[in-house]
């Protein structure tokens, strides 16, 4: 709510930290390449995190609803405990998730965004500014609502 008030008052939002990762499909992703092109939803998660697992179907439904709009989803697997990249890939395959995923090697991106709890979702607008942080499992309705607030002003 506070972020929305700041946006409507014209306050300057903090620029999102740039990063580069290799996507599960082998492609490369760099946040700064998205600036001016599309808004981003960055979801920090790991496979044995129960709320992370619970929210993934909602992310998939929201992604399908929002395809064709000015947004891209990226699930960032942050290695925790015994979870491996293969565990993350298996989980993505098991649920049939179709948006982009990558491994946050050595949790470097999570550290730069000061992620302390999982799941955390960071919404980044088309100008590369952090629009909002959500530290909780999200449902489809809230995801869609926040993306549309971010992309439609």
Image (cartoon, rainbow, N blue to C red):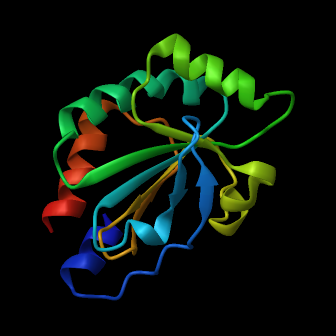
Q: Nearer the viewer, residue 10 or 113?
A: 113
Task: Please provide percent x and percent y for residue 119.
Answer: 57, 41
Quadrant in the picture for the N terminus: bottom left
* Residue 108 quadrant: bottom right
Residue sitting at the far left: 152
Residue name at image x 37 percent, y 57 percent: 40
- From the viewer's perspective, is residue 57 above or below residue 64? above
Task: Look at the image and tell me whether residue 153 can be seen.
Answer: yes
**Residue 41, how many percent across, how many down?**
40, 51
**What residue is at 53 percent from the left and 46 percent from the top?**
27
Using residue 120 as the reference point, say whether residue 139 is left or right of it: left
In the depicted view, which residue is nearer to us: 129 or 23?
Answer: 23
Left or right: 40 in relation to 7: right
Q: Is residue 126 above or below residue 64?
A: below
Query: Total of numbered circles in the picture?
Result: 0
Q: Residue at x 21, y 85 (%)?
A: 9
Residue 124 against residue 17 in the figure, above or below: above
**138 left or right of 63 in image:** right
If the image is split into quadrants, where does the C terminus sit?
A: bottom left
Q: x, y percentage for residue 4?
A: 26, 69
Residue 136 pos. (x, y %): 51, 41
Q: Nearer the viewer, residue 52 or 106?
A: 106
Q: Nearer the viewer, residue 102 or 3?
A: 102
Picture quadrant of residue 152 = bottom left
Give the residue furthest to the right: 82
- Furthest residue to the front? 26
**Side of 98 where 52 appears, left or right:** right
Q: Residue at the spot x=34%, y=70% of the render? A: 2
Res. 48 in view: no
């Amino acid at each position: 709510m506070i972020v929305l008030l700041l946006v409507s008052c014209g306050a300057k939002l903090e620029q999102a930290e740039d990063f580069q990762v290799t996507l599960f499909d082998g492609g490369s992703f760099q946040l700064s390449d998205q600036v001016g092109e599309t808004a981003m939803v960055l979801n920090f998660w790991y496979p044995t995190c129960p709320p992370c697992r619970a929210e993934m179907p909602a992310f998939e439904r929201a992604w399908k609803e929002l395809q064709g709009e000015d947004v891209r989803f990226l699930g960032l697997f942050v290695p925790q405990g015994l979870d491996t990249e293969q565990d993350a890939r298996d989980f993505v395959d098991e649920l049939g998730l179709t948006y982009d995923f990558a491994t946050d090697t050595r949790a470097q991106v999570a550290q730069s965004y000061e992620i302390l709890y999982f799941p955390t979702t960071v919404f980044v607008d088309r100008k590369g500014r952090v629009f909002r942080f959500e530290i909780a499992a999200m449902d489809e309705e809230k995801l869609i609502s926040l993306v549309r607030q971010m992309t439609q002003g």
